[in-house]
Amino acid sequence: MADLQAELAGVRAELRGTVRGEVGFDVTSRALTTMDASNYRRVPLGVVAPRDADDVAATLAACRAHGVPVVARGGGTSIAGQATGTGVVLDFTRHMDGLVSLDPESRTAVVQPGLILDRLQQAAAPHGLRFGPDPSTHSRCTLGGMIGNNSCGSHSVAWGTTADSVSELSVISARGDRLRPGRDWAGAPEGLRPLVEGELARLRTGFPDLPRRISGYALDALLPENGADVARSFCGSEGTLGIVTEAVVRLVEAPRARALAVLGYADESAAAEAAAGLLVHGPLTVEGMAADLVRSTADLPRGAAWLFVETGGDTAAEARTRAETIVRAADVLDSLVVTDPSGQRALWRIREDASGTATRMPDGSEAWPGWEDCAVPPARLGAYLRDFRGLLTAHGLRGTPYGHFGDGCIHVRIDFDLLTEAGIARFRGFSEELAELVTAHGGSLSGEHGDGQARAELLPRMYGAEMVTLFERAKGVWDPDDLLNPGMLVRPAPLDTNLRFSVLPREPVDVVFGYPADGGDFSAAVRRCVGVAKCRTPEAAGASVMCPSFRATGEEEHSTRGRARLLHEMLAGELVTDGWRSTEVRDALDLCLSCKGCRTDCPVGVDMATYKAEFLHHHYEGRRRPAAHYAMGWLPRWLRLVARTRTAWLVNSLASVRPLAAVAKRLGGIAAEREIPRVAGTTFTRAWRRGARKGARTPGRGRVFLWPDTFTEHLSPTVGLAAVRVLEAAGLDVLPIPPGKPVCCGLTYVSTGQLDRARAVMRGTLDAMNGLLEGAPHVVVLEPSCAAALRTDLPELLPDDPRAPRLSAAVLTFAEALERLAPDWTPPRVDRPAAGQTHCHQHAILGDTPDRRLREAAGLTGELAGGCCGVAGNFGFEKGHYAVSATCAEEQLLPSVRQAPEDAVILADGFSCRTQLEQLAGVRGRHLAEVLADALEGEGK
């Protein structure tokens, strides 16, 4: 052990002395890279983020001198285990992530390995160009990872694999040689050419002929008739031959217009049988998926499985004509042709999310990769799928195939039991039999994502022992010391070892939340994160929210996946050894805004806000908490005290004196940059009861109770009064919650992890409303975060109280109440453009479809921004969070307001959003209820 520690200290010291980039041997750096998106886990010694090729060379030299393996890593979305390792991980996403150049004339680009694919596409698009391959992880996967795995994507029927798009590489070998692999043996290491020329016959006959053959080394690319293309042969080598520091890639002309034909079939076998016959029409894509992977089939044509067939053209009409030709040629139950770009994007999101959706079976049980992307000749796909289903049944397993039907490549997640010895034995038995089945159909064990540890052990069944020996010899030429990613492709680790679940506790962890979707098991909740890394998307797309802190910092530990990895390691106890007391986990969760965006935007529904609250509860149990937890976590209590003592004027006066406010903020853990919001002189409930309601009532449509949330009650009573005005104008009887014990959703206690206090507050609320809940009431909640807490946190924190789901089911948003209870009411016309942001909790928990319809009916035009405002309750006010909070606001909210027309209505239903707008932009945001109430006043004049 002492020798090992000395060796570690030696390599760490040498790296820190020779590498200009970051060198991390700390617990957090290592924990973040123990896993990729596969079933496997390895604990690295450290992580290096090189700044340039010289840093890569220095890292290789140090590791070679100390006998430490090196693993190259891009976005970490590999699903066969090849982005994990026990040595030093090279993280190219921090610094070596640039687009060096782009030449529209030659249709080439020079890229660094950490460049995200979407950024290359964005740079190429103004020139009418694009990079052909486009895996579903295009928003976060890197070019280096794509080269390592020979990635393909949905357009491979038109533009092939990554290997088809690589012209030349810059590679540093394990022994420090700088090579430029290309055609005609360019950049070949010494000994490679003699090896190939001595095995020409074997190389000409030993590889199956199919479009998606990714398994093994592509040594046949070195045949003279194939141009002796060393760069092409290098693609798909999974970081085992050399380290790519730069690449020259070819671009293709992007169609000016596209159309998407969605074809409905009775089942996926019927869709698979049809796919090969459509290739003669020259489609850009032929993708297939079944209903089990679709959250809602409302936007899809009739059927139980679908082909997504994309066509291109110089005009929309030409693209549509080609799509309609394919529809006529296909034997379908139903079809849909879409030419509108936004409509196509919405449909493609259904397909792209399948990689995450597939990790859950329809009944909610878990499913895993491992046999994610076998490929067979497209003409044999239907027969293969029937045999595949039979094999699943024989082993008592379930899985739903989907993927690149036009290329014969099938993705599937299977409900393997990877937690018990019997389940792991069945995983091995199935894997061995499936390898034989794929080979019998003339296929490849990997058709896209590489072999890694998941399939490399079975390569002899596909290629035979002699070809695999040739792979080993080729690896020896490139990397004689076996320094680079050992255990992958050649001399692999067994496929049933290093499983990431083996380190997790077998008994349920004692937790406070109910975790109903995970059987009450916190370990199962953490296992939800499979690593597809949609949370690492550097730019928010459309209305999506996840993950604002990652987009603000660019650091893995501030992504949903990074935090899930740290929680996984906390439960494992091997690397993070102090459990709930872990400072590494605490620090990673500190910048989680609890926006709940991941609960909806993550394809597998990771709910990091809940996990954070759970962690904070245990972390501070029996210990003093940060001052902000008392100042802002107990906000409802403090504001009720101010209301009872009628001292709002005093609080506001003191807060307006800067020296006093500064002291108060320092004592309360509040960011110095923040202004303390003013407390209303009269609470909403008092104003309402004094007869502040205006306008004629036309009761009779129904009765609703208006929830006096903390923010409306004490900080924005005008919102509540406006809502009463509108709801009554719609003919609803609006009643206050009966006086007595105060009601509260417990949100501020939940977000600060004070879960015992939150449950006590929630039980008090249920007691106060006990009589009301018997009558299935409608409870209108104006503050989106409070409505979300009542919908989700309440029943999940009190799973054994039957009153909790009744109150949860009674909650309606303002727009939901009008749509459901006054469906024939016509709102007043506002007829103005609208800007602002949909509240993150509204997006994640409540949905905004009724709000959209209400805005449209009132003549409020324009789309609201996505993302998060950055305040998110207490987060943006806490000391140390201001910079991240402001960065989040600058992502979408503030630009949308600045770009809005002068007469635009700035909508912000959440108090946090309105506060951020006021403090950062000097703009008053308004609740939709206020806007409609003003319009009613205008109609009455």
Image (cartoon, rainbow, N blue to C red):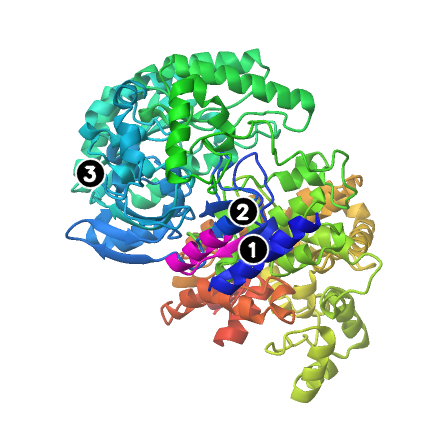
**What amino acid type is highlighted by mark number 3?**
Asp
Q: Circle 2 is placed at which residue position?
A: 68
Residue 183 falls in image quadrant: top left
Q: Residue at x 37, y 14 (%)?
A: 441
**What amino acid type is highlighted by mark number 1?**
Val
Which of the two labelled residues, at mark 2 and mark 1, occupies the earlier sequence position? Answer: 1
Q: Circle 1 is placed at which residue position?
A: 11
The mark found on residue 184 in the picture is 3
Residue 222 falls in image quadrant: top left
Residues at circles 3 and 1 in contact by the CB criterion of under 8 Å: no
Residues at circles 3 and 2 in contact by the CB criterion of under 8 Å: no
Q: Secondary structure at mark 3?
A: loop
Hey, which residue is sitting farthest right in the picture? 622
Residues at circles 2 and 1 in contact by the CB criterion of under 8 Å: yes
Q: How many marks?
A: 3
**What amino acid type is highlighted by mark number 2?**
Val
Q: Would residue 88 be found to the left or right of residue 168 on screen?
A: right
Q: What range is drawn magenta here?
A: 47-62
Asked if residue 61 lies in the magenta stretch, the reply is yes
**Residue mark closest to the camera, 3 vs 1:** 1
Q: Position of residue 840 (x, y in %)?
A: 55, 55
In this picture, is 35 found above or below 8?
A: above
